[in-house]
């Protein structure tokens, strides 16, 4: 495994993640997002929202699979399609932001990863909860990559600046000029 990459997760945690193991299923989920999200603002907005809501677990599972497999282009493409849905439904959660930080770390974009980790940490603190046990090791690997960098001091300053971001600002930052 090359430096700056995250190892894939070892186990499937939910039925939705097991769903994402099939190549066709991941592609169907990605196509669903691409075709449905633009309709959120149209006349069929309620139907589009309902369709995404029903398949949200599958969409997140596909996104997680792309991240775990290091397929960052696909992860960013799916995330960019889901961003309007996240913003509309206020689902820009710390776990989504941390997943986007993982994509940035895999791409070697450590400043972006550090900023996003800071934003996710601020969201966790503001919401008054701790990292879920199944997500904590993943978060800790991203932090370890940032901390072991030659520019660790600079990245810690960037991480601190990320703590001032809003959830929407973090999503915009994560997807801006990445693809």
Image (cartoon, helix red, strand yellow):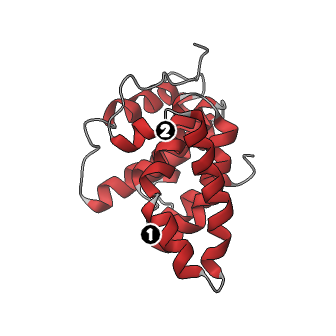
Bin the neighbour count of mark 1 within 10 Å (Cα to Cα): few under 14, some 14-19, many 20 and up. Answer: few
Q: Is residue 140 above or below residue 92?
A: above
Res. 177 visible in picture: yes
Task: Please name the residue shown 45% across and 54% down the image.
Answer: 163
Between 167 and 55, the one lying in front of the other is 55
Q: Position of residue 35 (x, y in %)?
A: 68, 62
Q: Position of residue 121 (x, y in %)?
A: 38, 49
Q: Quarter of the image containing the N terminus?
A: top right
Q: Position of residue 10 (x, y in %)?
A: 38, 22
Q: CA distance from mark 2 to mark 1?
A: 24 Å
Q: Which residue is mark 2?
A: 20
Q: Which residue is mark 1?
A: 90
Task: Please name the residue shown 47% across and 32% down the image.
Answer: 142
Between 5 and 82, the one lying in front of the other is 82
Q: Is residue 76 above or below residue 123?
A: above
User: Is 8 displayed left or right of 38 in the figure?
Assistant: left
Q: Is residue 149 above or below residue 128?
A: above
Task: Please name the residue shown 58% across and 59% down the image.
Answer: 82
């Amino acid at each position: 495994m090359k430096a700056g990459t995250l190892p894939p997760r070892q186990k499937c945690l939910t039925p939705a993640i097991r769903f994402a193991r099939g190549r066709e299923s991941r592609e169907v989920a990605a196509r669903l997002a691409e075709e449905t999200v633009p309709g959120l603002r149209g006349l069929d907005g309620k139907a589009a929202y309902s369709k995404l809501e029903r398949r949200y677990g599958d969409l997140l599972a596909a996104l997680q699979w792309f991240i775990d497999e290091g397929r960052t282009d696909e992860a960013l493409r799916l995330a960019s399609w889901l961003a309007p849905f996240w913003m509309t439904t206020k689902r820009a959660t710390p776990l989504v932001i941390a997943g986007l930080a993982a994509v940035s770390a895999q791409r070697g974009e450590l400043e972006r990863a550090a900023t996003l980790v800071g934003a996710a940490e601020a969201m966790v603190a503001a919401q008054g909860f701790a990292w879920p046990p199944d997500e904590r090791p993943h978060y800790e690997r991203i932090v370890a990559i940032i901390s072991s960098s030659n520019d660790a001091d600079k990245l810690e300053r960037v991480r601190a600046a990320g703590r001032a971001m809003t959830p929407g600002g973090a999503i915009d930052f994560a997807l801006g000029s990445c693809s």
